[in-house]
Image (cartoon, helix red, strand yellow):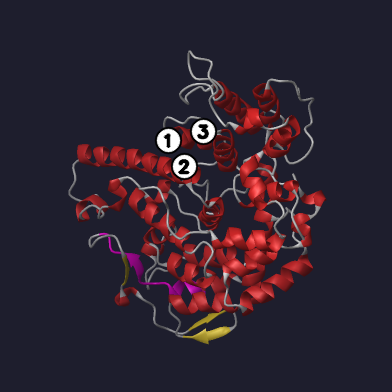
Amino acid sequence: MPMTFQDARHLLSRTGFGGTPADIRELTGLDREVAVDQLLAGVGRTARTTPPSHLLNALPPAEGMTGKGLSVEQKQALKQERREDVFELKGWWYQELLATPSPLTERLTLFWHNHFTSSFHKVKWPALLYHQNVLLRHHARGSFRDLLFQIAKDPAMVLYLDTQSNHRDHPNENFARELFELFTLGEGHYTETDIKEAARAFTGWHVALRHGGGFAFNRRQHDAGVKHVLGKTGAFGGDDILAIALDQPACARYITAKLWREFVSDEPDAREVERLAVQFRNGGYQIAPLLRGLLTLPQFWAPETRGLLVKSPVELLVGTVRLLNLPIKDTAMLAKYGKRLGQDLFDPPNVKGWPGGTRWITSATLLNRWQLLQRGLRGADMGGPMHTHAGTGEMHGAAWVTEEAAETVQAVLVPVPPVNPVPTGEDRWQMVHHLVMDPTFQLK
C-alpha cells in the first residue's frame, strides 16, 4: 500500500529519530514494504564518526589493568583518566547518533546496548565498552545467534557479569542467570538448577587482564563434568549452553516480543508474536527478516498505535537536534542531558537496563524534559538560539521551519493533534516552540 505523508512520518519516527519534510517526502508514495526494505538495506555495520584515539589504542599494560604495583596517587590518576575517557566515549556516540545517515542503525545499536547491558561503573575500562559498542552495531541487523555467541565472550560482558570469577571450585551464577532471564528465555522458562548447571559450563571463561585484555579460556579452571541443562545432558561447555538456549522456542518468542515493544506497541499480540517467532527461529535467528515482519504488520500501521510510545531521552535529544538543526558546541553536553533525563549511555541502572516505555515519564522527568527543551530553544549551552544568529537576527536552524506551511510543521513535529492550542501565525518559530513544549512531542 502506498504511504501517505503521515505514514512515512510514522515509519521514520519509529525506526529512527523522526524526519524532516524532505526525509518524509522521499518515502511518501512508496509501498510500505518497499520503504521498510529500503530502511533495512541502509543499516550499516560500522560507525561513520571517528572515535577518540585512546579508544582504539591497545589496553594498558598489566599493572594498569589490575592496579597491582601502582601507588595510591597513580591509581587515583588512572581513575580520573578513565572517567574523562568514558565521557569522551559518550560524546562520541552522540556524534554518531546525530551524524548517521541510517538512524535505524543507531536505534538498533541502542536496543542491543539495552538488551546486552554492560556499564562503565562495573567494567571501568572505556576501551572495552567502545569495542562492545562496535560489536553490537556490527550485528545489529544480522544474526542474533552470532551476536549472542560473541557478546558472551565480549571482555566488557565477562567483567560486568562476573564470569571472570567463575571457577571450577567456586562457580559464579551471574552470567548464567542473566543469559536465561534477560538475554534469551525470559522468566519462567528455566529453573534454579538450570542456572547452577549452566554456570558450571562457563567456568574458565575470563579476560586476560595481564595479556592485553582479551577473552581467554583457562582449562584448569573449567568444570568438565556432566551437566543437566534445560532437559539436555552432557559434558557441556559454554558454547553448548548458548546453543541449547537458542534451541528453546521461548528464546525466539522472547526476542520477538521485546522487539515488538520497541517498535510496534507496548502490548504485543501473542498470536502474531508466535507466528513471527517461529519464522525467526526457523530462519536461523536472522534479525532483519524479523524486523521486516514487525514493520509490515497491520498493527504497526494502525492509526490507534501511532503516538502511543514514549521517546527515550536519547531519542528526544537526538531527534530534536536533528529535526531543528540545533547548533551543538559539544556533544558531551548531550550526554549530560541524557543522564539528567535518566538514560546515561554506557551506564544503565542495572543488568535489566532501562525499563523504558511509559516509565520514562514521571512528574520529575517530564519537568526536566521541558526544561532541557526550553534551554535548547533558547540556545543555552548550544552556541546561540536555534532561530537567530547572535547579534544579526538572521535565521539560524532548520530552514524547512519557515519554508513549510503551518500544517506541515505540525505534522512533522507531533504524531497526534497537540494537547494545547498552537499559534499558526506568521512566526513559525513561535509555533515550533509551542509544539516542542506540547506533551505530544514526547511521543512517537
For badge 3, the amino acid type reads Tyr
Q: Which residues are magenta?
A: 197-209
Is 337 in front, or is 163?
337
With 349 as the anchor, is 222 left or right in this view? Answer: left
| Residue bearing the label numbered 2 | 94
| Residue bearing the label numbered 3 | 337
**Is the residue under label 1 in contact with that under label 2 (CB below 8 Å)?**
yes
Earlier residue among tags 3 and 1: 1
**Is the residue under label 2 in contact with that under label 3 (CB below 8 Å)?**
no
Tell which residue pokes out farthest to the top in this image. Answer: 391
Is 120 in front, or is 173?
120
For badge 2, the amino acid type reads Tyr
**Is the residue under label 1 in contact with that under label 3 (CB below 8 Å)?**
no
Query: Secondary structure under badge 1?
Result: helix
Q: What numbered label is drawn on residue 332?
A: 1
Q: Is residue 34 magenta?
A: no
The N terminus: image quadrant: bottom right
Distance from Cα at disc 2 to Cα at disc 1: 8 Å
Earlier residue among tags 3 and 2: 2
Residue 425 x/y as whole percent: 74, 21
Is 325 in front, or is 316?
325
Is 353 in front, or is 181?
353
Query: Secondary structure under badge 2?
Result: helix
Task: Establish if 179 lies above or below 435.
Answer: below
- Residue drawn at (61%, 31%), measured in percent from left and top? 369
Task: Establish if 284 lies above or below 120.
Answer: below
Residue 442 x/y as whole percent: 68, 37
Distance from Cα at disc 3 to Cα at disc 2: 11 Å
